[in-house]
Amino acid sequence: MRILIGVTGSIAAYKAAEVVSALKKSGAEVTVVMTEHATELVGPATFRGLSGNEVRVGLFERWPGKPIHIDLATGHDVVAIIPATANIIGKIACGICDDLLSTVVLSTRSPVLVAPAMNEAMYGNVAVQENIATLKERGISFIEPETGWLACGVEGIGRLASLDTILAAIGDAASTADVAGASDAVAAPKAAAASKDLAGRKVVVTGGATLEPLDEVRFISNRSSGKMAAALARVAVRRGAETVLVAGVMAVPPPPGVKVVRVETGAEMKQAIQDEWEDTDCIVMAAAVCDFRPERVAKGKLKRRDGLVLKLASTDDILGSFSRKKNKRMMVGFALETENAVEGGKRKLDEKDLDLVIANNPLREGTGFGSDKNAGYLIYRDGRVEEMPLMSKLDLSEKVFDAVASHLAAMP
Ligand code: CTP
């Protein structure tokens, strides 16, 4: 598998080194093309060392045979720009090729992935957003940036996607690339070369936090980031499932190829699942549903001077209610347990009549809300318990869908 990584002049350029290193480790052949600006931030020697190949910057470098940009454009199965500045995005959108990277991108027929990383205001700029929309329409895939702390000292959207997300996107692009041997040696997810064992199946994944209003401006909610659900949905799509993501409040963007239904309250989530229920084969309920809602929702805004005693009512158990009428559908739940995860997970599996439970402790170090990693136990209907050591949420999703695929395949 031959991958061309284009590095541009964003402060996140140093993170491209990790991407190159992980790809190399997986056996991929990696070539790096840098813009002049990128070389101000990270030395070409870093990428030369990590990729084992000469790093290219100039359009007029000496190159045997064909012109350098044509050779690079035709010699790679995936072209990924990591990180991508507003400048390169604008240039590709307008067809400008005034350096090696932009010229290669314009000359290639391979799938192009773009991972933007920039200041929040730049990212939100109308020109940048219009250029992104134009490129998406033309079939260029974006690895959406995350929300978080930015190098310019503000909190907002524009941070380069996580390493796992980038590797997964490259893996997805490689596994669908129309080239011989495309899936030979791609990085995470490790099963990128796996078969489409969920083709013909419909999977509904729920994720993120629900919120329950107190009045017309306030609500109660929880800390779920939706990263687990985004990973699950990404893996379901890659394995060929028609995938619906019923998304509460999520801090990460949904992966490409997924039908997204946005909801806020638990009642809306329940209705959204009901709307998809008829032809669904499997529900994976990763959402952190609020267990309580204010008994009454005040009109307008409650006044501070009036004080407030909140009376909460329990929300419906969404998963349990659908499980009761599941028929041949596979029901997968999460059990969030701060102690005795296996015991609590088994109880929930029985009480909610589930087929698989992922029991995890969100307080365990290195896991939980906002983290890219998770750990816990897979608890099966037949009593088997499989311990899941600390792993990326994408790898855990692969395990979950291994179980889903074999359960569905065994159904009469
Ligand atoms: N769940 C649901 N509806 C709710 C609460 C939870 O469908 N109102 C789902 C969750 O998405 C998860 C599973 O049920 O897949 C277990 O959620 P968890 O919060 O661990 O357990 P609860 O059922 O809420 O029980 P408790 O809070 O008492 O542990």
Image (cartoon, helix red, strand yellow):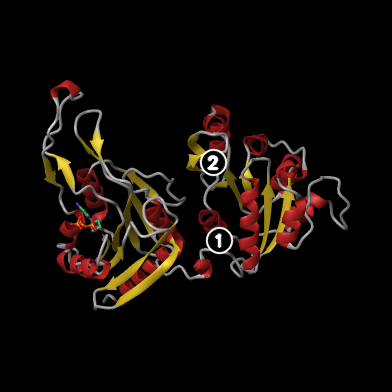
Location of residue 128 by image quarter: top right
Q: Which residue is drawn at 14% across and 62% down?
A: 324
Q: In this view, does 288 lie to the left or right of 66?
A: left
Residue 346 visible, this angle: yes
Q: What element carries label 2?
A: helix
Q: In this view, does 71 lie to the left or right of 298?
A: right
- Which three-letter amino acid code belongs to the residue tagged 1? Gly
Q: Which of 290 and 275 is in front in this view?
A: 290
Q: In this view, does 63 lie to the left or right of 41?
A: right
Q: Compared with residue 103, is residue 257 higher up or lower down, i.e. above or below?
A: below
Asked if the residue at tag 2 contacts the one at tag 1, i.e. Cβ–Cβ closer than 8 Å, the answer is no
The residue pinned by badge 2 equals 137
Location of residue 132 by image quarter: top right
Residue 388 at x, y = what percent?
Answer: 38, 70
Q: Is residue 204 left or right of residue 353?
A: right
Residue 402 visible, this angle: no
Residue 191 at x, y = what percent?
Answer: 50, 69
- Ligand 1: which quarter? bottom left
How packed mark 2 is, by other alpha carbons closer than 10 Å (few <14, some 14-19, many 20 or more), is few
Q: Is mark 1 on a helix, strand or loop?
A: helix
Q: Residue at x 23, y 42 (%)?
A: 265
Q: Which of marks 1 and 2 is nearer the N terminus?
A: 2
Q: Nearer the viewer, residue 247 or 40?
A: 40
- Which three-letter amino acid code belongs to the residue tagged 2? Glu
Task: State the quadrant of the N terminus.
Answer: bottom right
How packed mark 1 is, by other alpha carbons closer than 10 Å (few <14, some 14-19, many 20 or more), is many
Q: Mark 1 vs ligand 1: CB under 8 Å?
A: no
Residue 33 at x, y = what percent?
Answer: 73, 50
The residue pinned by badge 1 equals 171
Residue 313 at x, y = what percent?
Answer: 11, 44
Q: Residue at x 62, y 62 (%)?
A: 23
Q: Compared with residue 210, is residue 234 higher up or lower down, i.e. above or below?
A: below
